[in-house]
């Protein structure tokens, strides 16, 4: 370390202590301690440079001393101190750097002014976000695990639950601050926005508030809430919203789109979503706002136009295409068309408007094989349902009923019942019609100038948002949800959202070379135990842990560290500017 003098544009000289290092063959430096302008410092210390040099010498001496061997006594009969909290996690320094980047602490402290909180709301959020990543569980369990970290968490379990109301109130401000921070620090591709909806269940029987009975993605007969999530092309979240469990998927997208455009100041966006979002209302709103869309179009439903289906399966116009992702057996074709949407006019009536669209159809041998394989399993269950309807109910037939004729379900009990005077039988005609469409996918889009291949590529980006839901439900343990008030439910999903955002940013900064699970596992393993005299010993190191630490400018390879050094590392964790 050395004393650095820097001449500013105003002619004044600033003084600091800097530390040099080699990085990628280039000499770089970082500021360790700043002292402001030299003339101001001289008013307090006549020998200002000598004063700063003395501090620099002391820091260099402490750094040199830290490299010397230290003798520690081992007492064979010493008991484990139950008050020490056991193992502590140093890997949390990695997500903490991203937590700082997102501006969460600054936003919470600004919003907390004048609220009279007798505890640190940021400390609560920090613990809940890290625990959601490292050891997901209840809010009470998070508080019980607070001693597993090197930062202070001086608040009670009651304070944790009180803070949830405050977090829900800060939801939009936190999402907006996070978006602003990510856009300033990372190069975001906001041209395509991916949106989808999923639901989360509760371990309760009777619905109330936000917790309503709806169509569960997991076929659970429990009250649920709906959550809509929007991400950019790289899978970094842009916005989220929570809706009552009985809200149709198609009604959730426009609020998320409005929030993302407001937070990010986006220009024209292309919305990419699943079949459930392909509605007249959504397309009309997107188009009127001069945005674009890429949606899958169903050709298997009873409302699908026969003319569209016939065009899709007709061999005329198909181009064989060798696709690196699908291998041989891939063909594509497209046509310009119109789609009817209905817009409410000044007279309060709905009027039909025809919108120009491009329709892209493709067939994949891989998708064809998968469709046949999956249908075979469902048809097998359908035969079992025909043989013994009483053994199944609405929640347990798992789609088999659509291939069975002459069967209904009791609305109250869900029990499968044969129609009066009729015998259940397999609908062979439906199976044949669906087999005809195996392997075919259809996309409609407003982006008529794009190539067929580019449209397919955009559509396939939906896998990232599907993966995000898997991460929240498995790695982050977002369900079942154990809080029950609307504010607490919103706060719970805000915490999950921030944890997901941190994971996605870590993946982005490591080139998406790792999935979420190994990243979380590495961070959780980076723990240590206290020896004596404030020395700590750490056990875990791998190529991945080294890489994760390097993304936030840290070296976490040392086995033995003083407590002061550990705290210094946590405070030092920062992302390089302009990553």
Image (cartoon, grey):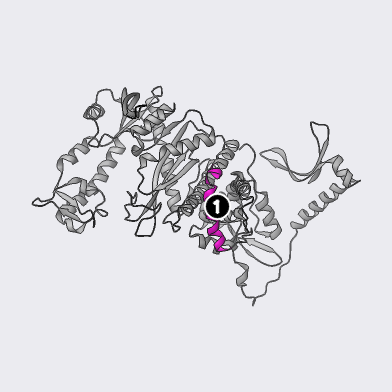
How far from the left and from the top, in percent, is residue 131? 53, 56
Report the residue at 46% width, 32% height from top: 192
512 falls in the magenta region: no
How far from the left and from the top, in percent, is residue 369? 27, 40
Kindly give the residue lying farthest to the bottom in the view shown.
Answer: 77
- Taking depth in this image into account, of 81 and 303 the one nearest to the observer is 303
158 falls in the magenta region: yes
Locate the C terminus and report the quarter of the image it occupies: top right
The residue identified by callout 1 is 166
Label 1 element class? helix
Q: Is residue 162 left or right of residue 13?
A: left
Report the residue at 60% width, 72% height from top: 82
Kindly give the residue lying farthest to the right in the view shown.
Answer: 46
How far from the left and from the top, in percent, is residue 544? 55, 49
Q: How many marks?
A: 1
Specify start and end residues of the magenta stretch as a single range: 156-175
- Taking depth in this image into account, of 35 and 60 the one nearest to the observer is 35
How far from the left and from the top, in percent, is residue 512? 50, 42
Residue 522 seen in the figure? no
Report the residue at 52% width, 54% height from top: 165
- Taking depth in this image into account, of 141 and 430 the one nearest to the observer is 141
Q: Is residue 555 left or right of residue 525?
A: right
Vertical order, 521 against 187 (above or below): below
Vertical order, 330 against 499 (above or below): above
């Amino acid at each position: 370390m050395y004393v650095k003098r820097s001449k500013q544009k105003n002619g004044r000289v600033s003084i600091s202590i800097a530390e040099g290092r080699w990085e990628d063959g280039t000499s770089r430096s970082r500021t360790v301690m700043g002292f402001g302008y030299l003339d101001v410092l001289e008013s307090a210390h006549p020998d200002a440079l000598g004063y700063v040099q003395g501090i620099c010498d002391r820091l260099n001496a402490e750094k040199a001393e830290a490299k010397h061997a230290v003798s520690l006594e081992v007492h064979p009969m010493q008991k484990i101190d139950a008050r020490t909290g056991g193992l502590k996690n140093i890997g949390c320094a990695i997500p903490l750097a991203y937590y700082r980047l997102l501006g969460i602490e600054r936003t919470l402290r600004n919003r907390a002014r004048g609220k009279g909180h007798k505890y640190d709301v940021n400390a609560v959020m920090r613990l809940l976000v890290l625990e959601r990543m490292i050891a997901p569980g209840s809010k009470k369990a998070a508080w019980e695990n607070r001693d597993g970290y090197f930062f202070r968490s001086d608040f009670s379990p009651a304070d944790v639950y009180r803070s949830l109301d405050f977090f829900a109130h800060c939801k939009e401000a936190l999402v907006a601050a996070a978006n602003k921070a990510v856009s300033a620090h990372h190069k975001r591709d906001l041209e395509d926005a991916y949106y989808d909806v999923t639901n989360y269940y509760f371990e309760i029987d009777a619905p109330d508030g936000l917790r309503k009975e709806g169509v569960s993605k997991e076929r659970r007969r429990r009250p649920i809430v709906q959550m809509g999530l929007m991400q950019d092309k790289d899978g970094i979240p842009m916005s989220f919203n929570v809706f009552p469990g009985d809200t149709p998927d198609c009604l959730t997208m426009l609020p998320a789109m409005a929030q993302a455009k407001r937070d990010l100041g986006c220009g024209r966006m292309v919305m990419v979503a699943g079949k459930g979002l392909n509605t007249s209302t959504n397309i009309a709103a997107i188009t009127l706002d001069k945005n674009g869309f890429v949606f899958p179009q169903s050709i298997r439903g009873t409302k699908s136009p026969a003319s569209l289906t016939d065009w899709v399966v007709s061999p005329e116009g198909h181009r064989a295409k060798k696709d690196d992702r699908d291998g041989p057996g891939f063909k594509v074709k497209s046509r310009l068309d119109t789609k009817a949407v209905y817009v409410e006019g000044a007279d309060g009536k709905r009027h039909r408007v025809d919108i120009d669209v491009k329709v892209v159809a493709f067939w994949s041998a891989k998708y064809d094989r998968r469709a046949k394989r999956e249908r075979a399993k469902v048809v097998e269950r359908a035969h079992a349902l025909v043989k013994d309807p009483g053994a199944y109910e609405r929640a347990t037939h798992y789609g088999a009923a659509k291939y069975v004729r002459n069967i209904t379900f009791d609305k109250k009990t869900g029990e499968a019942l044969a129609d009066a005077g009729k015998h259940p039988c397999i609908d062979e005609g439906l199976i044949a019609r669906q087999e005809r469409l195996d392997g075919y996918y259809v996309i409609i889009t407003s982006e008529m100038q794009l190539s067929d291949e580019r449209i397919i590529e955009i559509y396939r980006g939906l896998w990232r948002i599907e993966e995000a839901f898997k991460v929240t439900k498995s790695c982050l343990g977002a369900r079942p949800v154990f809080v029950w008030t609307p504010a607490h439910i919103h706060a719970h999903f805000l915490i999950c959202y921030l944890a997901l955002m941190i994971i996605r940013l870590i993946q982005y900064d490591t080139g998406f070379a790792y999935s979420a699970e190994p990243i979380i596992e590495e961070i959780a393993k980076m723990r240590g135990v206290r020896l004596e005299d404030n020395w700590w010993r750490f056990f875990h190191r791998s190529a991945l842990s080294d890489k994760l630490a390097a993304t936030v400018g840290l070296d976490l390879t040392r086995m033995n560290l003083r407590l002061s050094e550990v705290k210094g590392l946590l405070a030092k964790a920062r992302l390089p500017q302009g990553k």
